[in-house]
Image: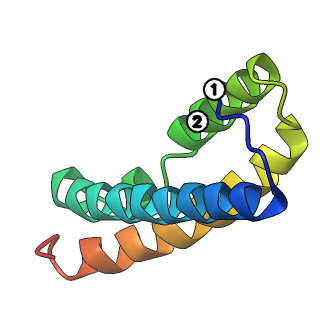
Amino acid sequence: MKKCNSLQEVRDEIDRVDDNLVELISQRSYLIRQAAGFKNSVDEVKAQDRIDDIMQRVRKRGIELNINPNMLSDLFKIMIDEMVETEISEFRNGGNF
């Protein structure tokens, strides 16, 4: 972690991290759209067991990093819900993104 020496430096670092987060979410979305091509049904797209595993892993990692696991759960729930809808659309279009 970088030790900042001014409020502006903190803000600049936050902006950099935010940009990285957006890029990582974009990468995740791209992979989700690819996954649709490997699935055989909408139920398989929804994959509740996989979602449960992700949520448990994220919460555990949050605890390890001293981040509120409830906040992470809320963020990931929003992201996963939206990406499942994207994947369902992709699946219905034949998985050819």
Residue 93 coordinates in the image, percent (x, y): 20, 82
Estimate how packed mark 2 is, as few (under 14), some (14 to 19) or many (20 or more) residues with alpha carbons within 10 Å.
some
Q: Is residue 66 above or below residue 52?
A: above
Q: Is residue 75 above or below residue 68?
A: below
Q: Which residue is mark 2?
A: 54
Count numbered badges in the picture: 2
Which disc number belongs to residue 95? none
Q: Which residue is mark 1?
A: 57
Most extreme residue toward the left, as rendered? 96
Most extreme residue toward the top, as rendered? 64
**Mark 2 belongs to which amino acid?**
Ile
Q: Residue at x 58, y 35 (%)?
A: 54
Q: Report the quarter where the C terminus lies.
A: bottom left
Q: Is residue 62 above or below residue 8?
A: above
Q: Dot 1: what SS? A: helix
Estimate how packed mark 1 is, as few (under 14), some (14 to 19) or many (20 or more) residues with alpha carbons within 10 Å.
few
- State left or right for residue 96 relative to residue 87: left
**Mark 1 belongs to which amino acid?**
Arg
Who is closer to the viewer here, 16 or 37? 16
Q: Dot 2: what SS? A: helix
Quarter of the image where one finds residue 12: bottom right
- State left or right for residue 73 relative to residue 27: right
Who is closer to the viewer here, 92 or 9? 9
Q: Residue at x 67, y 53 (%)?
A: 76
Who is closer to the viewer here, 92 or 57? 57
The answer to whether the residue labelled 2 contacts the one labelled 1, judged by CB atoms less than 8 Å apart, is yes
Residue 52 coordinates in the image, percent (x, y): 64, 36
Q: Report the quarter where the N terminus lies.
A: top right
